Amino acid sequence: MASGLPDLDAVSAVCAALSKPFNFMAGIKGKSFTVAELAEAGVRRISLSTSLYRMAMTSLVEAAREVKDKGTFGYLDRSLTRQDLDAFIRGHRQQIAALLDTFHVPRIPLEPRRQPSGKTIHVWAVEGDYDPSALRSITFVGTHP
């Protein structure tokens, strides 16, 4: 991974110089390219880093400021309905699979896991050249209303 590459030409040069797949870190303001542009440049893995979390927190701060400063709730018109959010969460498996297919990453299906709450989690593995000491799991704790 080489963060902060200035343009697609630099990304292409790095990809061409490596014998292993290059991991591009999305999420650096002003250094954003499309998935198609990165794939054409030779990128085979994309890390979103903390960009989705930062975007979620940006939306939270903007909504709180709107209520505090304007006394309005316009952010509700821009938010997903509960049904749309539930559908998105249910559909995440297919979306992730489609993204992996974009980069021709073979998936190894694993047995679905059932959580104590009854929710079924569909999981799979990918095979590749990874340094086990560099792999990290993303863990979060949340509550459901």
Image (spheres, rainbow, N blue to C red):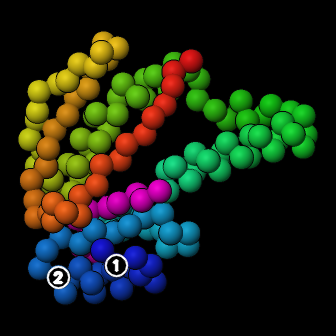
Q: Is residue 44 magenta?
A: yes
Residue type indicated by callout 2: Leu
Which quadrant of the structure image shows residue 141? Answer: top left
Residue type indicated by callout 1: Ala
User: Looking at the picture, does residue 92 appear above or below residue 22?
Assistant: above
Q: Nearer the viewer, residue 94 or 120?
A: 120
Query: Magenta-highlighted stretch: main secondary structure?
Result: loop
> Over which residues does the magenta segment extend?
41-50
- Circle 2 sits on which residue? 18
* Residue name at image x 73 percent, y 35 percent: 75
User: Looking at the picture, does residue 87 appear above or below residue 62?
Assistant: above
Query: Regarding mark 1 in the picture, which secondary structure is present there?
Result: loop
Q: Is residue 140 left or right of residue 93?
A: right
User: Looking at the picture, does residue 21 appear above or below residue 18?
Assistant: above
Q: Is residue 87 magenta?
A: no
- Circle 1 sits on which residue? 2
Query: Regarding mark 2 in the picture, which secondary structure is present there?
Result: loop
Q: Is residue 11 left or right of residue 17?
A: right
* Residue name at image x 41 percent, y 81 percent: 5
Task: Return the residue found at the far top.
Answer: 118
Tell me the mark number nearer the camera, choosing from 1 and 2: 1
Disc 1 crowd rating (10 Å Cα; few below 14, some 14-19, many 20+) is: few
Which quadrant of the structure image shows residue 110? Answer: top left
Q: How far from the left and from the top, in percent, is residue 127?
A: 9, 53
* Residue name at image x 71 percent, y 46 percent: 61
Q: How far from the left and from the top, in percent, is residue 108?
A: 8, 41
Which quadrant of the structure image shows residue 95? Answer: top left
